[in-house]
Image (cartoon, rainbow, N blue to C red):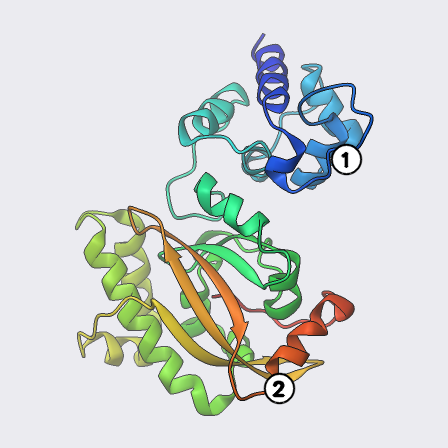
Amino acid sequence: MRHTELGAFLRSRRDRIRPADVGLPAGPRRRVPGLRRDEVAQLAGASVDYYNELERGAGSQPSEQMIAALARALRLTADERDYLYHLAGRPVPVPGGAASHVHPGMLDLLQRMPATPAQVITDLHVTLVQNPLAVALLGDQSGYRGARASFVHRWFTEPEARDLYPEADHATRSRAFVADLRAAAARRDAKDAEVTSMIRSLLDTSAEFAALWADHDVAFRRDDRKRIRHPALGVVEVNCLNLFSEDGRQRLLWFTPALGTDSADLLGLLAVLGTQDVVDSTS
């Protein structure tokens, strides 16, 4: 019964979305006003056969990652996303994790920025969704789970995460990450288990983090100029701009070429290079 309701709910949400809402061409011959099944499957990164099974109320139980992808593809509200998890028999993820619900407005803006590297991250630097150019510039972040989903956590615990930036910039990046994390912790409830657990873990495992945390610097990163090391393009200097959600828990990041550099030409090559040999990174 629950799987039947799941299929019916997916159909109802698919029917209300127009192709233009998600950046797809309408085309001259459409039999349905909303999205086709194959279009939803494409947006969610699923096979068409698998998605067809879901709508028929058959097939295997969808994973939490697939539910999150479907919620984004169908532009579900937070309440609708939670209901979808209920129908699928999966626990609703805690805010801030890799399966967090992406603010629909930010997802819409991201969809409208195809020519600019852009991504949505949480206040703890967990990447929720990236456009293709962000993947080409920064690497695919879809495979990280648990504490490792946060780039800040990886920055202080996994040396290879720092390959994203030139070594001369590491100290500046470290201080900026710590100040930003302290600002995020202050905005959250003092009993928030996610952020307190992350801070405790970093204090226990990273002497560098502990020393910087003791300085009590606090500052949200609203805009930044940074140098990114790309394996094929070399060093690309960009401006990193931020748009925050109302509660501050999500931000849309987009990267523009820094004036006075050759970064505009380098970023223009990203679409040609695609995601080949990109480095692990985020935010």
- Find numbered disc 1 in the image and state the secondary structure of the residue it sits on: loop
- What residue lies at 44% left-to-right and 30% top-to-bottom? 77
- Find numbered disc 2 in the image and state the secondary structure of the residue it sits on: loop
Residue at the bottom extreme of this rendering: 168
209 and 133: which is toward the camera: 133
**Left or right: 12, with 27 as reference point:** left
Quadrant of the drawing holding the N terminus? top right
- The amino acid sitting under disc 1 is Ser
Q: Which residue is mark 2?
A: 262
Displayed quadrant of residue 117: bottom right
The image shows residue 124 at horizontal and vertical percentages of 37, 58
Front tag of 1 and 2: 2
- What residue lies at 73% left-to-right and 33% top-to-bottom? 26
Q: Is residue 58 above or below residue 201?
A: above
Structural crowding at the residue carrying mark 2, measured as other residues with C-alpha within 10 Å and reported as few (<14), some (14–19) or many (≥20): few
The image shows residue 180 at horizontal and vertical percentages of 30, 67
Q: Which residue is mark 1?
A: 47
- What residue lies at 49% left-to-right and 27% top-to-bottom? 85
Q: What is the CA distance from the residue labelled 1 to the residue labelled 2?
A: 40 Å
**Left or right: 225, with 9 as reference point:** left
Q: How many marks?
A: 2
